[in-house]
Image (tube, rainbow, N blue to C red):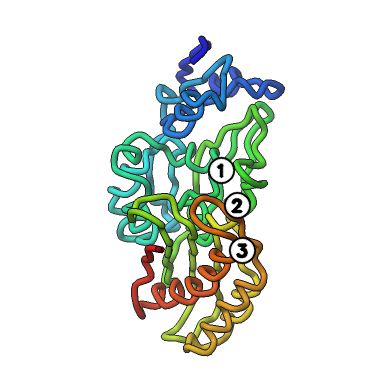
Amino acid sequence: MIPFELAEPRSLEEAIALLDGADDTVRPIAGGTALMLMMKAGVFRPTRLIALRRVAGENGIDLAADGSLHIGALATLSALGRTPAVREGFPVIAQTLRTLSNVRVRNVATIGGNLAHADPHMDLPPVLAALGAQVRVAGPKGERTVAVENLFAGYYETVLARNELIAQVIVPPLGAKRAAYAKVTTRSADDWPALGIAVVLDAQGLNVRTADVFVSAATEKPIRLKAAEAVLRGAEANETNLSRAGEAAAGEVETTADARGSASYKQELVRVFVKRAVRKALGLGDAQGRAG
């Protein structure tokens, strides 16, 4: 690796001041689980890294009075998975974290870095999007709020400016809604997925009032499956309607080929796993899959 400057700010304001909105070689680094690999491979050569580990007050995980979950951007994924408020009030997040990479990565990776990296294979973005989560973004001009659904602009791209940082993730109360995440991996259960489907349902019994359905890994960014949601909305989750939802999802999404499978293979996975994810959310069966 070539030499670079390392800055260690102690506050969010100081960190933002060290960023350069016009220079892509100046980057923040939190856990570094992705950025360090890019540097070692020579894909990214920084002139300055702003290490965020010493920034105070940005790693809390708190349940607000209204039942919403407030997660500091520097909270590690391991800490998130161990938090009782997460395990009890948002079990889909805790369950997703169990097979997100491995424990060594989760011990250092942060939720802010996980989202800002915008790797389409990550498990948390579709889950948080389906839950209606938002990120509080801080920059030199102040703060703004962005829905996780709207955070990703494309492959490894977000709507964040180069001199903006994710400060906090806010997840609204799940309440009586039911949620599930189903992924397909080509190797081990904690491998990057070939497909991820996140589902949040407002349902009474098998009667679905509303549905939020997102696909990831098979696409360049997490995408809402609007046609599948329309099929499920106001319908009974029987085999006929679940099959219709899977067909609608496969028909509306454009999948991408990579080392984990062809585009047509992933489209078939969408068709099958939308149905399985809904069943899993309703407690009708598990949907963890491993391909080929």
Residue drawn 53% across and 83% down?
Answer: 243
Q: What amino acid is at disc 2?
A: Lys
How busy is the neighbourhood of tag 2: few (under 14 within 10 Å), some, or many (20 plus)? many
Residue 99 place in picture, x, y as percent: 34, 53
Rendering quarter of residue 108: top left
- Residue 94 numbered mark, or none: none
To which residue does mark 1 refer? 118
Q: Is residue 84 visible?
A: yes
Tag 3, which secondary structure? strand
Indicate the quadrant where residue 180 lies: bottom left
Sequence-wise, which precedes: disc 1 or disc 3?
1
Horizontal relation, residue 259 to residue 145: left or right: left
The disc, 1 or 2, on the residue closer to the chain's N-terminal end is: 1
Element type at mark 1: loop
Q: Is residue 188 left or right of residue 129?
A: left
Total numbered circles: 3
**Dot 3 amino acid type:** Arg
* Residue 7 to residue 275: above or below: above
| Residue holding disc 3 | 224
Q: Find the distance from the CA under tag 3 to the CA under tag 2.
A: 10 Å
In contact (CB < 8 Å): disc 3 and disc 2: no
Tell me what residue is drawn at x 58 percent, y 14 percent. Answer: 47
In-front residue for pair 64/11? 11
Q: Which residue does the image show at 57% across and 32% down from the upper left? A: 165
In this rendering, the label closer to the viewer, 3 or 2: 2
Q: Residue 278's spot in the image, x, y percent?
A: 46, 75
Residue extending furthest right? 22
Q: Position of residue 194 (x, y in %)?
A: 48, 57
- The residue that label 2 is drawn on is 221
Q: Of 115 and 156, which appears nearest the observer?
A: 156
Instruction: Using the image, determine if residue 56 lies above or below residue 287.
Output: above
Residues tagged 1 and 2 counted as in contact (Cβ below 8 A)? yes
